[in-house]
Image (cartoon, helix red, strand yellow):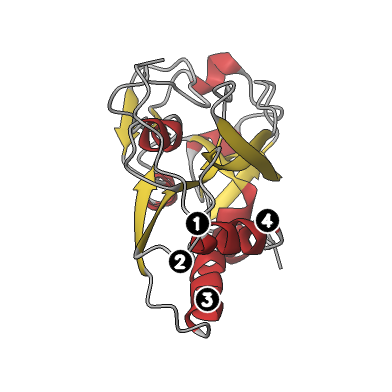
Amino acid sequence: MSALARPPPEMTGWETQLRIAMDAILPLAPLLQQIKAFNQLDKRVAITISEEVLDGTWDALIAGRCDLTLGASGDIPKGIFEHKLIDDVEFVFAVARGHPLCLHKEPVDAAAISAFPTIVMADSSLSVPARSSGLLESRQIIRVANAAAKIHAQVMGVCVGFLPTHLIQHEIQQGDLVVLNCTVPRPNIPLYLAWYKGNQGKALHWFIESCSSSSWLNLH
C-alpha cells in the first residue's frame, strides 16, 4: 500500500463539493437516484462522479481524489477508513450466442476455456499494486477499462470470461449471452462503501446513509 494522503479536514457543515469514486461493476442508476433525492435539499453541493476498477476505488480514497468510494472490494485498509457492506456480487461464465464453447459438454473446464481469448477489466489504481479479478488462463488476455466494454466484447464473441450477473440480465434474456456451467471457481465478491474516519461533512453522511440503503444489484 502506498503512502496515505492527508485525510480531509474535519467538517461539520455542508461541503461545497463531494467527490464520489464508483467501481465500474456497479450500475449508475441507483447513485443518480440518490443525487436526484439529494437535490431536493437545495444545498448546492457540487458532485463529481469518477469511475474506478478494482483497487482503483481504494487508491482514489487513499490519494485524496474522492471523499466517498462505492463498490470497493478486496482487502480493506486498516485503521483509517470507515466502511459499510453494500452487497455481494455474483458472477457467471458467459459466452456469445453461437460461440464454439456452447457446443462443449458442460461443465466447461479450464482446458476448454484456455483455447479462447479471455477478457478482464484492468485495475485503475495509480499507486496501489494492480489486482486482477476473474483472470483465466488462456492463449490471449484482453484488458478493457470498464464493465460495459467487457460485456460488449463478450456479446460480439471476441472473448470469453466471467461477468456480474446483475449487469447482463438483458443480454441473457435476449439470448445474446449464454451462461455456461464452469468448473473454474469464481466466488462472490463483497462490495463496500468507504470514507475517511473523522470526515463529518453533512453531504458525505447524507450519501453514506442513502447509499447504504440503496438496492445496487437488483436483478428485477
> From what the image shows, is residue 118 above or below residue 136?
below
- Categorize mark 3 by other alpha carbons within 10 Å: few (<14), some (14-19), many (20+): some
Query: Distance from label 1 to label 4 (Cα)?
Result: 16 Å
The image position of residue 6, as x and y in percent, is 35, 30
Position of 28 with respect to 215 (left or right) is left
Q: Examine the rendered structure and indicate whether residue 52 appears above or below residue 6.
A: below
Residue 195 screen position, x and y as percent: 52, 42
> Separation of disc 4 and disc 2 at Cα?
20 Å
Real-space Cα separation, disc 1 to disc 2, in angstroms: 6 Å
Dot 4: element: helix
As drawn, the label of residue 152 is none
Q: Amino acid at mark 1?
A: Gly
In the image, residue 67 lies at what x, y percent? Answer: 43, 48
How many residues crowd mark 1 within 10 Å: few (<14), some (14–19), many (20+)? some
Quarter of the rendering containing residue 55: top left
Q: Which residue is mark 4?
A: 212
Comparing labels 4 and 2, the label whose residue is closer to the camera: 2
Mark nearest the camera among 3 and 1 is 1
Decide: marks 4, 2 in contact (CB < 8 A)?
no
- Mark carried by residue 201: 1
How far across and how far down the image is residue 115, in percent? 44, 20
Three-letter residue code for mark 3: Phe
Q: Which residue is mark 2?
A: 14
Q: Residue at x 48, y 22 (%)?
A: 135
The crowding category of the residue bearing disc 2, from other C-alpha atoms within 10 Å (few below 14, some 14 to 19, many at least 20), is some
Q: Earlier in the sequence, mark 3 or mark 4?
A: 3
Q: Is residue 76 left or right of residue 21?
A: right
Q: Earlier in the sequence, mark 1 or mark 4?
A: 1
Q: Earlier in the sequence, mark 4 or mark 2?
A: 2
Residue 38, labelled with which disc? Answer: 3
